[in-house]
Image: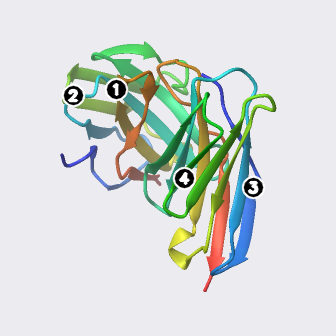
Amino acid sequence: DAGVIQSPRHEVTEMGQEVTLRCKPISGHDYLFWYRQTMMRGLELLIYFNNNVPIDDSGMPEDRFSAKMPNASFSTLKIQPSEPRDSAVYFCASSNRTGGTVTQYFGPGTRLTVL
Amino acid sequence: SQQGEEDPQALSIQEGENATMNCSYKTSINNLQWYRQNSGRGLVHLILIRSNEREKHSGRLRVTLDTSKKSSSLLITASRAADTASYFCAPDNAGNMLTFGGGTRLMVKP
């Protein structure tokens, strides 16, 4: 398996623009997580899905952020409009619970810079 | 889920030395996992220790778990420059997600 795939790897945009980040989880995994990492706030969980259904979006900072998972092999995180404080590395991770344990597999991340 | 707290926040050692980092958590767990993050990369799972285990080894890694003290430690023996990374613990109490703390930043000097 190729692991969790994220695109783009780097994104530079201007304030006010719409940004869409994409994630392909590992085949067979039924959980998908979106994280944001900054020096100031560390690794924050934004939202997670189970079987394509959003379970907990309490970490989504505000209405400018939205996430979808239209099928088991694809998810998007959208920021509209983007602001400089959204600059961060965004990670997608997937997992399944087997044998009573859950191990998360992370993608390489998307480094977002909002000017 | 609950967040683990790693200690120290940062650690600097010479190549060949051992590195020890600690993790504390608050409530009972099913297992505890350790992850590594190299600069600019995603987290990578290193090792999992179940609540009924006290010690586990994987190569140069040794993990201990003390459920009475709600703490775990990760020991990296004979460290290498390539071990330079941030290390995170993740207590798993049978929820559906893991929560990560601030991690321990390890620097191994050649």
Q: Mark 3 to mark 4: distance in Å?
A: 23 Å
* Chain of residue at mark 4: B
Q: Which amino acid does the dot numbered 1 rest on?
A: Asn
Residue behind mark 3: B9
The image position of residue A41, as x and y in percent, is 65, 43
Q: Residues within 10 Å of mark 3 (few under 14, many from 20)?
A: some
Q: Mark 2 to mark 4: distance in Å?
A: 28 Å
- Look at the numbered discs 1 and 2 and tell me whether their residues touch, using CB distance below 8 Å: yes
- Look at the numbered discs 3 and 2 and tell me whether their residues touch, using CB distance below 8 Å: no
Which mark is on residue A96? Answer: 1
Q: Residue at x 29, y 31 (%)?
A: A76
Q: Nearer the viewer, residue A24 or B36?
A: B36
Query: By what rule are the colours in the image chosen?
Result: rainbow
Q: Mark 1 to mark 2: distance in Å?
A: 8 Å
Disc 2 is placed on an element classified as loop
Q: Residue at x 55, y 25 (%)?
A: A59
Residue behind mark 4: B57
